[in-house]
Image (spheres, helix red, strand yellow):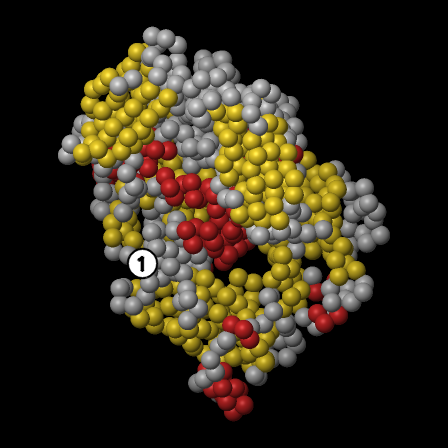
Amino acid sequence: MKKFPLFVVLAAFFLLNTSYSRGQSMPERQVGFNSEWKFYLGDAPDAPQKDFNDSGWRAVQLPHDWSIALPFDSTSPTGTGGGALRGGLGWYRKIFSVPAASRGKQVFIDFDGVYCNSEVFINGHSLGLRPNGFISFQYDLTPYLNYGKAVNVIAVKVDNSQQPNSRWYSGSGIYRNVWLETLNPVHIDHWGVSVTTPVVDEQSARVVLTAKAANSGDETTNITVKTTVYDEMRKALRSVTTIIRAGGKAVASTQQEFTIALPRLWSVDHPYLYNAVTQLFVGTKLADEYSTRFGIRYFDFDAATGFSLNGKRMKIIGVCDHHDLGCLGAAVNRRALERQLEILKRMGCNGIRTSHNPPAPELLELCDRMGFIVMDEAFDMWKKPKNKFDYHLNWDAWHRRDMEDQVLRDRNHPSVFIWSIGNEIPEQWSGKDGMDTSGSVIARELAAIVRSLDSSRPITAALNDPRPANAIYKSGVLDLVGFNYHHQDYQSFPVKFPGQKFIATETVSALMTRGHYDMPSDSIRRWPERWDKPFDKGNPDLTCSAYDNCSAPWGSTHEETLKELMKYDLASGMFIWTGFDYLGEPTPYPWPARSSYFGIVDLAGFPKDVYYLYQSLFTAKPVLYIFPHWNWSAGETVDVWGYYNQADEVELFLNGQSLGKRNKDNDAMHVMWRVKFAPGTLKAVSRKNGKTVLEKVIQTAGLPSGIQLTADRNHIHPDGTDLSFVSVKIIDGAGNLVPYAADEVTFSVKGKGFIAGTDNGNPTSMESFQSLSRKAFNGLCLAVIQSNGLAGDIVVSASAPGLKPAVLTITAR
């Protein structure tokens, strides 16, 4: 048994019996480092030097994506797969000072993500390179800093010039947040706290916390580690104190255990979070304090019954999403992410797959708080390439470090349920004549890395060749067998993969343009060509019908996959391709299409019609939704679809005359009427046991008359980052949306904000996202308003020739 000096034992006793007050905590250990940067697009090899003249560079606030401000370009080497927006090489510089009081402390800089091939310099010294554009990383600035009045220069080179290097829009630059950490010589190591809940039931939970304390001093030090668990009301529940010895320039760890009686369990409906506050003391002096949010939950994937959370069976109804935020590009913004999740939550979505890379930390924090089940994905390729200049070039040197850093960073998030080690990896076909080759070898290596750092979650890989002969499957390391598409094979899964657990890692790939409808609607069309081949067999305006009847050749309609998913208990859930349209991959069309058609929600955040299918199936709210719009040519045959729930039938009326009642027979998920168009009023009534549940009315719209502005939030924070998304409708004199309107709307802003971007959801629009004007697309467009950091009113005006203008006030306070 290790013995400690008496003064150490007395100090620990004192700490254990002293109540912890949040008001007595240390200053914040991590502060934002996003302001007062300068940026230059081009090469500047002397930029790391302190006397370099950057007076001609542009002032920017991080996070920053330089590509989103560039023009769409048919000759861009990124191709339309990369959004037809150029990459290039750029430099960032920031001059800053470090107070004299920080001398003797450890100062680190943390980058949440830089795309890509970054090199960081401090006062002319290179701190290192990081090729992976999606990974978070940290550098120690301490040996090179000046203190007091002497300034420091940090410079960051970002090289996104080798193209193509991504199959979707990547963005370019320091596109995630940057932080500065100032710590005492004794401190919690980087990502040095791990929390697990190995034993959980309704009565109690065992919480295990492992903390790593770093000692940057030269002498061996006795460190008292005290952790207190708080509930959401900041009430202290349990406290444990341990003592460790850390050698000079060394890291020591300790494990602490807590029992929480009657725990509040984290779930998708009630995402309850606890907070573990870990304090390090040297003697009686507080050296560091580190907070870890965590959730208590238990879950299971079963080969026969699928997924259960806290003992209750449920389906994961998730979506895949790329990381761009529409007109804001790749530059991460917490409110923009939150808005996306709010839209998905209202749809009935409960899961997110981070396709196909480590996500921004803010996304996982929001999923923790809002209740989403996350598949945290690492790689889109391993050693074999998908693009000429993609991550395969850096695989040998970096994959282990990148995999470790992803797990270390993300392992405490209760929203993370699944680790995915790869998406549609070419090595899955590397087996020959039944022999394991690189696919199995690499899969085993990656799984071993993950399990060495976190064994509390299952591992999967997204297989688009879901056969038992698949080399990745044959590795034997997948806890969950992941299918991309192949919904027709769900039934045979228990025969082909006996005893295995199943997750649909990627599904659907349906194609839709919001607000566009081709007749008839009751025949399913598979587009015969891929996006990377010439395609001239579709609509000349590059639209896809918004009825759920078009898909990519490898995919299905939403209803086709949903029927299979709901039919088999073994199917634990699915992740739909995709939740939102995204920049790049404009399947099925080539240029001038520049963004995808896959989303349930368009690029601007406007739901497509199929959104209400999911809402009718997976939410508790009563739903009745009919489409399309009611502006057609006289006598034209129009297919009217309806999604509904909590009712036995729906009756449709045209100008007061019944067109008949419909109900969803067998496994049908919508009802349909084939109607000869006549202008006027289309009305649907849903009924349960003969009583009306809901009514839905669509009017024939007249000529465009005015503009209607609606903000998703009329009050925002004056912090310089908060956003209000202002939806714009072109309306007729009666206030009806004009479904064909394409009026060009010009925006202006006065007061304490500015326009961060505009959009309309049209995959073929070549207007700059930075433009202060935007054509409506099928009657809608969007302006994103951002706080400028000052409190006060933000007055948004919108005008268009021949239309009544509109004004909206947003308050930043």
* In this picture, residue 7 sits left or right of residue 463: right
Position of 385 with respect to 674 (left or right) is right
Q: Do we see residue 486 in this rendering?
A: no
View extreme (bottom): residue: 6
Total marks shown come to: 1
Crowd band around label 1 with a 10 angstrom C-alpha radius: few (<14), some (14–19), many (20+): some
Query: Is 708 on the left or on the right of 261, as rendered?
Result: right
| Residue 591, horizontal then vertical, whole percent | 56, 21
Q: Can the viewer see residue 19 in this picture?
A: yes
**Most extreme residue toward the left, as rendered?**
689
> Residue 86 at what x, y percent from top left?
64, 31
Looking at the rendered image, the quarter that the N terminus falls into is bottom left
Q: Quadrant of residue 259?
A: bottom left
Expressed as whole percent of the image width and height from the top left, the position of residue 130 reads: 62, 49
Q: Is residue 111 left or right of residue 120?
A: left
Q: Residue at x 35, y 9 (%)?
A: 636
Looking at the image, which is closer to me, 518 or 46? 518
Amino acid beneath label 1: Tyr
- Frontmost residue, 691 versus 136: 691
Q: Height in image: 11 above or below 311?
A: below
- Residue appearing at x 48%, y 83% in the figure: 18
Which residue does the image show at 25% across and 56% down from the upper left? Answer: 311
Q: Nearer the viewer, residue 696 or 58?
A: 696
Percent position of residue 282, x then y = 58, 80
**Residue at 50% of width from left, 89% of height from top?**
10
Is label 1 in a helix, a strand or a loop?
loop
Tag 1 residue = 298
